[in-house]
Amino acid sequence: MNHAPGARGARGAAPRHDDRRRSFPQVAPRSAPDGRFAATWWGNAWVTALEGAALDPARLARGKAYAGRGHVDAITVTPGRVVAYVHGSRPRPYRTEIRMRTLGDDGWERFLEEAAARPDNIAALLDKDVPHALEAVTGLLPAPGDLVPDCSCPDDGYPCKHAAALCYQAARLLDEDPFVLFLMRGRGEQELLAELTRRNAARGAAETGAAAPPMPTVAARIALAAATGAGLPPLPPELPVPDRPGRPAVFPPDPAAPDPLALDLLATEAAARAHAFLATGHDPVAALSPWQDAVRLAAAHPGSGLTASSRALYRDLAYALDRTPTDLARAVAAWRQGGAAGLAVLEEPWDPPAGPFDRARPALLAADFPALRPWRNRLSGESLQLRLGRDGLWYGYESDAGREDWWPRGAPDPDPVGALTDLLGR
């Protein structure tokens, strides 16, 4: 974690976190499933900008090979600049950087207005996805010629193979976290999220205020009539239950206060439970264990485990329940797959009665799926697994071949063939 330099303020507060400078460890080599270098549309748009301006395809090929072999050290990103040391044929690595222009205030205003106009845009950003609509209104991604390479090597290619390698590895950073792109263009993650939270809350408050009905009242003189023996009038009718929970207040960032996004999550959770209790007289989560409730809470957050604040949420929830963040991440995947029943399938092997389980293996073989090994309620292959839940549904799991590291994938299905088909994307 990087912090802004300088002494403490006059009131003794710690210096604010500076997310306008981020350093990333060496990126592990990998390739996208379809053979492209990057896995996301914006990562590949970055690669296209690099390749569209390159003067020598041979240098690009060598740069891609350098990136694939791990020649690029840790990468530092600041507004308008990407810097790393890249190893070449000489013992000392070369200092390499890529420069690009930052967005002006007008460009960021268009981005923020478009992002805050629709809740699904904000949810997509929290899930580390970039809607095409945001790129269309702002031009966040570079066009050919926007990336300016510079390297301490003697090669005068445009770009040299070291700068090309850095560009290719930067595309993988963008795959993992599109907020790196926003930082390259001039704005840090926390700054953007705080502004989006403020605009979203202001928009919601304006919508709620315009539709709020007047509240029934009782005049004080009538209420005090009991003193004269006249008795009290009946109370006004109960207010109707709103259609949906209210929006939480805006929590501005403060170095002395809890994280504003964590507060927003807790306030939203409290509002949803209160609304459900008011409407039904029943708390939908009262019967859950602390572990189940922690998993449910983490699963309800759209960016869980991805943004800096949600990673802290994972860490704190897991620590409080004597689990690891990986345990929690796996449990969240199971909860999103099937709720409490999906979590039970993850954690509770059981012996199903004869019938659906025994018929599953021949049904899968008839559908040209590979043979799976049975064990209790599970059918396992090298990298695919089906688990029969107590609810009668089949749940899909995946693991790297040869490892017992199973993760929930796909949607549950009463038909084992349908569950495995969804898992494989057929």
Image (cartoon, rainbow, N blue to C red):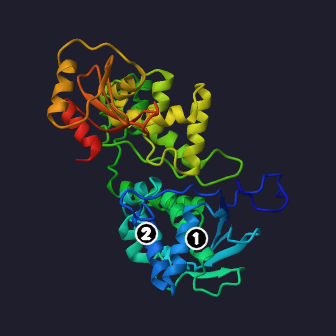
Element under disc 1: helix
- Circle number at residue 44: 2
Element under disc 2: helix
Q: As drawn, which residue projects farthest toward the front?
A: 89
Q: Amino acid at mark 2?
A: Asn
- Circle number at residue 165: 1
The Cα atoms of the two marked residues, 1 and 2, are separated by: 14 Å
**Could you say where residue 317 lies in the image, as x and y percent from the top left?**
57, 33
Q: Is residue 415 visible?
A: no
Quarter assignment of residue 287: top left
**Could you say where residue 240 lies in the image, as x and y percent from the top left?**
29, 38
**Could you say where residue 386 lies in the image, as x and y percent from the top left?**
30, 29
Q: Is residue 139 left or right of residue 379?
A: right
Please state which of the two labelled residues, at mark 1 or mark 2, is closer to the viewer. Answer: 1
Q: Residues within 10 Å of mark 2 (few under 14, many from 20)?
A: some
Q: Is residue 300 above or below residue 113?
A: above
